[in-house]
Amino acid sequence: MEDEKYVLHDWKGRKIYVKSKKESLAQMVTETIINLRRFLVTQKIDELAKNISSIEDDAEKLDVLNETVDYTSLKKLLSDKLYRVL
């Protein structure tokens, strides 16, 4: 790979330790998956918000609102895992 041609110069001698790519790869994959799920949940919330105005039945509107609240709490949970503030 292109970036591996550069070598850190004696950082260990100065007691500065850098993680290798293998150590941080699992964390980056996990964060990417959670971020994608958060994005999809946001799209679902937006879709529900658009469609709620076309619903006539009050009971069905209440169901959609409850579903929106559930998705919003899921989005908050995913954001907490990513250490992001809503």
Image (cartoon, rainbow, N blue to C red):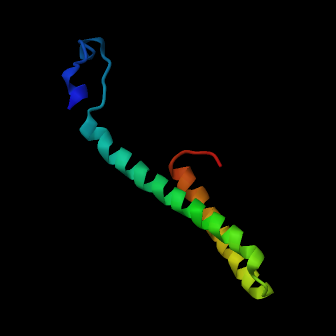
Going by the image, does 41 lie left or right of 62? left
- Quarter of the image where one finds residue 4: top left
The correct choice, above or below, for 15 with respect to 27 in the image is above
Q: Nearer the viewer, residue 34 or 50?
A: 50
The residue drawn where x is 72% and y is 85% is 60
Count the marks: 0
Q: Nearer the viewer, residue 24 or 60?
A: 60
- Residue 2 position, x and y percent, is 22, 28
Going by the image, does 57 lie left or right of 68? right
The residue drawn where x is 51% and y is 48% is 82
Going by the image, does 62 lie left or right of 2? right
Q: Nearer the viewer, residue 39 or 28?
A: 39
Residue, far front: 54
- Residue 68 position, x and y percent, is 67, 70
The correct choice, above or below, for 64 with respect to 35 in the image is below
The residue drawn where x is 73% and y is 75% is 52
Task: Specify the quadrant that holds the N terminus.
Answer: top left
- Quarter of the image where one finds residue 8: top left
- Residue 55 position, x and y percent, is 75, 82
The residue drawn where x is 77% and y is 74% is 53
